[in-house]
Amino acid sequence: MENTSAESITATIKDVLMWMNLSINNCRGQFYDGASVMIGCKSGVAKRISDLEPKALHSHFYGHALNLIVQDTLKAISIMKNALNTVHEITKLIKKFPKRECLFEKVKEKILPETPGICILCPTRWTLRAESFYSISENYEALQFAREETKSETKDSEIVARIGGVAAQMEKFPLLFGIKFGKTILCMVDNLSKSLQKVTLLAKEGQKVVERTLITLKFIRSKTSFEPY
């Protein structure tokens, strides 16, 4: 593909279909994310394909649509918004500085040798949310021990202030609750997102997967399920 323009992407799609001996006239659906180059109403890829085959109706990519909904929902809940921001900050402070990550690993090996390492929370890769929350939850104690050593090894006043801010949040119940609860919710949502992205998934099967996830989420709202928190 020469570039990522709508014209180039459309030409590549047509070439691939021709190479596979498939007619574009048999296309009955298009699923893309929200990028303008893909869904632009005047000259996007979806419009160009629809011009070739009107029955190739465009719909927003299920997995991407789900992630946008989850993102907006979590940010509308103050506890979860704070948990997301703090987890992101923790993972940045650890993973983006090798010396700090090495210090953390030494502390973890002493007190929690069986726990997994820290998984960075990347805002653009939402399928890693649950994994990142899980890694922070499992290493909560190690992170609290490591922060003092990290602060003493850091001379940058801005970084010291950021570490202090995270430390203050970690002493509060709302953050711990947000991480524990978020881990449970995001695990199910991430699994749903991965299921919706399977190339072999049929629309009817996708609806059933969503329905099962909704049933599970409703059960979590019951008193029995909420007791562990």
Image (tube, helix red, strand yellow):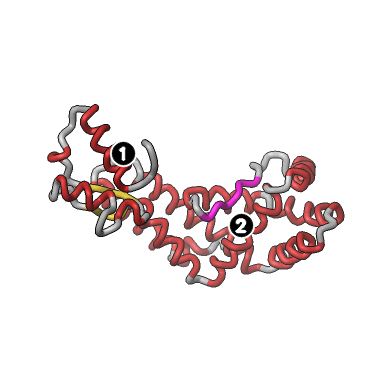
Q: Which residue is mark 2?
A: 88
Which picture quadrant has residue 7?
A: top left
Q: Amino acid at mark 1?
A: Val
Q: For the residue carrying disc 2, how many other residues have a C-alpha within 10 Å: few (<14), some (14-19), or many (20+)? A: some
Q: Which residue is mark 1?
A: 199
Which picture quadrant has residue 216?
A: bottom left
Q: Amino acid at mark 2?
A: His
Residue 133 shows up from this direction: yes
Read off the magenta span: 118-123
Question: x, y percentage for residue 57?
Answer: 19, 52
Question: Is residue 142 found left or right of 203 in the rendered image?
Answer: right
Which picture quadrant has residue 217?
A: bottom left
Question: x, y percentage for residue 104?
Answer: 75, 46
Q: Residue at x 25, y 51 (%)?
A: 46
Question: x, y percentage for residue 87?
Answer: 62, 58
Looking at the image, residue 77 lies above or below residue 126: below
Q: Which of the marked residues, 1 or 2, is nearer the chain's N terminus?
A: 2
Check disc 1 and report its element: helix, strand or loop: loop
Q: Residue at x 70, y 54 (%)?
A: 93
Q: For the residue carrying disc 1, how many other residues have a C-alpha within 10 Å: few (<14), some (14-19), or many (20+)? A: few
Marks 1/2: CA–CA distance: 30 Å
Residue 111 shows up from this direction: no
